[in-house]
Amino acid sequence: GLKTGMYYLRSRPAADAIKFTVDASMLE
């Protein structure tokens, strides 16, 4: 969910945050 995503973004380096964003875009 959104809370999990925000926690992920806070607890990972920028590179992984970008990967998370790309993965989310692929789901659309």
Image (tube, rainbow, N blue to C red):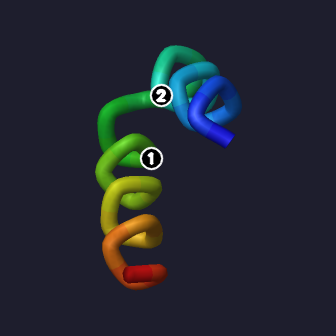
Q: Is residue 5 left or right of residue 14?
A: right
Q: Residues within 10 Å of mark 1 (few under 14, many from 20)?
A: few
* Residue in front for this viewpoint, 6 or 2: 2
Residue flagged by tag 1: what amino acid is it? Answer: Asp
Please tell me whether mark 2 sits on a helix, a strand or a loop.
Answer: helix
* Whole-number angstrom distance, CA of label 2 to CA of label 1: 8 Å
Q: Which mark sits nearer the N-terminus, 2 or 1?
A: 2
Q: In the picture provided, is 17 more to the left or to the right than 10? A: left
Q: Residues within 10 Å of mark 2 (few under 14, many from 20)?
A: some
Task: Identify the residue at image location x=43%, y=66%.
Answer: 24
Horizontal relation, residue 16 to residue 6: left or right: left
Whether residue 28 is situated above or below residue 22 in the rendered picture: below
Q: What residue did someone put label 2 on?
A: 9
Residue 22, relative to residue 27: is it above or below?
A: above
Judged left or right of residue 14, residue 2 is right
Q: Which mark is residue 1?
A: none
Please, what secondary structure does the residue beneath circle 1 have?
helix
Residue visible at 47% across and 81% down? Answer: 27
Q: Nearer the viewer, mark 2 or mark 1?
A: 2
Q: Report x, y in % for residue 5.
A: 57, 36
**Which quadrant: the C terminus?**
bottom left
Q: Amino acid at mark 2?
A: Leu
Q: Quadrant of residue 8?
A: top right
* Discs 2, 1 touching: Cβ within 8 Å: no
Give the residue at x 44% y 47%: 16
Q: Position of residue 23 (x, y in %)?
A: 45, 71
Residue 1 position, x and y percent, is: 68, 42
> So how many labels did they put on this image?
2
Q: Which residue is mark 1?
A: 16
